Image (spheres, helix red, strand yellow):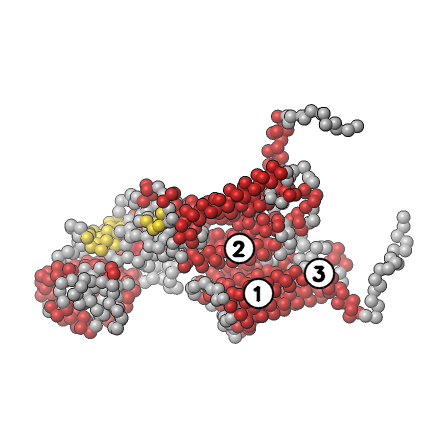
Amino acid sequence: MTATAAAPAQPRTPRAASAVPLAGARLLWVELRHNAMPFILPLIAALLWFDSYRPSMTQPPVWAWRTFWNMGQGHTIIDFGPFVAGVAAWMGSREGRRAITDLITAAARPRWITQLATWAATAIWAVGAYLVFAGVMFGVYVAQGILGAPPWWWVAVGAVAVAAFSAAGFAVGAFYPSRFAAPLAAFGSVVVLMMSSQTGFRDTSGWALILPTNSNGNYQSPSGIFYPYLPDLPIARMMLLAGITLAAVGLLGLPSRAGSLRLRWTAAVVTLAGVVMAGTAIGLATTARLGPAGIVIPALHDAANDREIPATPVCSHTAGTPVCLNPVYRPYLADVTAALHPALAQMAGLPGAPARVTQTAGSYNSTEGAYDEAMTISGHPPVLGVPLGTFLLPGTSGFTSAPVRFADFASQLQALAVHAFVGAGAGPGTMAQQAVQAALLQGAGMPFAAQPKVLGQAGVAPPPPGAPAPTGAGAAGPGHDVGPASRSVYAAAHRLAALPAAARRAWLTAHLAAVQSGQLTLAQLP
Amino acid sequence: MTAAGVHQARPGAESAPAGQPGRAALRLLGMFLVSRRVPAALAVLAGLGALMWAALHWHWNIAGGPAAQQVIPLAIETGAAAVIAVASYGPFGEPERATGRWLPWLRLASALILTTAAVGALAAGATGGYLLGGTPALVRDVGGMAGLGLLSAVALGGPFGWTGPMAYWLITESALAEGWTTPWIWPGRPPDDTGAAICAGLFFAAGLAAFTVRGARTSVRD
């Protein structure tokens, strides 16, 4: 008896059609139960605690700062990536190691489909664990009363990155079925992440912004507090990582033993789609530019995201001046108010003295972490704008080896407030401005001897003797006596500070406008 | 069918090298090493040595503090330790354990051969340029991490022995970035530091002893 060619093809019955997804689900369930990934998850959890969670706890309870290391600089990806890639390579090399590739090829389901089921189970374990671990970490932050907005886009990038590492590792194992595939995939992931970090730290523009460990220009103090986290870069990164995932998964279906010709064509299309997606993402990243609220990719940008997050400031008073901060900074209101009190007391009643102190958002810059921006006095009545993200706030900080003392925080705030008051701008100011600044700071309780160090820490110290005069934003206009702080500056400051309080106040009232405009020379001080 | 006559070797089979115990031992060691894919491991170690040479010769480095400066050599040393750990895995499992009288000695020999080869390959690679701490630090770091890899192989199984050195690399980078100076993070200490040498030596000795006595775990999920 033979099966004749004339035998009519039997259409698949509805029951058989429904059995296909059911069988697929069963296959996936089998792979989930026999996957090696859960075996390694306790180790990843321990590493995540050590490398991502523990350092974050040294930061103030603000989302952008707590998660700067683990999300902004991608340390959760570094903690997961090599291990996920290694275990995925082990799973991918399973059939080859057991020498059952031919057996699988002759089985009911195409080899590519069975490989996809194995990879999917591996990725589900890895991505699921990533989301659970990140969720637990965020839950602990929330329980501690963290302020601001969580960086959900970066969590999504991490999840897609974990999937990409699993796909790439699986492909390594499938094409190199050896016991060394797992460590090689893990080692390769370490090298890739090292290069990503290196390029990310160095390059502040162009394609390198696509790297998931690059925080330049996109994860800074105003993030989630004054401005929403811009999704432009995370979307491009997810496109890149999803493209890598598709390309790696598609590659598995290209060999002749992967399945039918139609299936292999499908795999080729998937691979090509992945490559195109990754290439498009890199192309989009090259168009990125720094906007007021972070890195903008024009093709992905929604202008609505540039708007400041509305917030009702929290205020207190000192020296007759209201001091208002973003509500996220409420825990620091008392410290800021106390820190500014001596400086505001010196300025009170003088022309141009701030009638109000308001925290400003500050702007993003192209480097990593905190931006560096001076205080400003503007408007009528004058408002002292304080970009607090510039400072290391009192208490513990991951950026210093010891807790930041209130006295250090206060002296920098005072120095910058007085610096803005004398009209010195972003640079050291004219010599007359430096002298008046020194006298006012001395009046606020900061000895002359301590001032150069504080001004240096605040980034507005005069250049050392012999150094070229500042140019650009920090420079005064032509003809002004800009120069290094010298004995003559402090001699003039001594003379001004030595005047009786009433006489000093009268001189300042009469000449402060000239000082602020940079018209007064050092010789014209009393 | 009976088992009669099975004590006789089949015609043409290689006879036991009676009176030549040294040759027999060498043959046994050779077969053991092949079963552990040691030749392939040696090739990978040679590749890592070449990578070390290239990294030092062309000054591949990452700008930053102590953690960044050591990241590339340390990653290569981690790779070498991972290869040693993975080569501990045997394909025969319980039958080999039950019948292999010389197994502990063979394990000891294979671990020592691979560790020596790793140190040799990386030390040769280090001639490509300046390696922080020089060869003494290299010996200490690779030895300590190899011990960690062998311990991982004993605890988790040979296929996952690489996770120990990889986890240690990650912990070391994080600790160095935070300025830790504990001798347990031996790559961050000077090459003549006694505490670091003791800690690395302890790990190597513990790993070697555990692997020699117990071997890599075989009941790992696959």
Q: Which residue is mark 2?
A: A189
Q: CA distance from mark 1 to mark 2?
A: 19 Å
Amino acid of disc 2: Ser
Q: Chain of mark 2?
A: A
Count numbered badges in the picture: 3
Q: Which residue is mark 1?
A: B50
Tell if the residue under mark 2 belongs to the same chain as the one under mark 3.
no
Q: Position of residue A481 (x, y in %)?
A: 17, 67
* Label 1 close to label 2 by CB (< 8 Å): no
Q: Is residue B56 left or right of residue A417?
A: right
Q: Residue placed at 48% from the left, 52% from the top? A: A77
Closer mark to the observer between disc 1 and disc 2: 1
In the rendered image, the quadrant that contains the N terminus of chain A is top right
- Identify the element where label 2 is drawn: helix
Can the viewer see residue A234?
Answer: no
Can the viewer see residue A161?
Answer: yes
Judging depth in this view, the residue of A287 and A37 nearest the camera is A287
- Identify the element where label 3 is drawn: helix
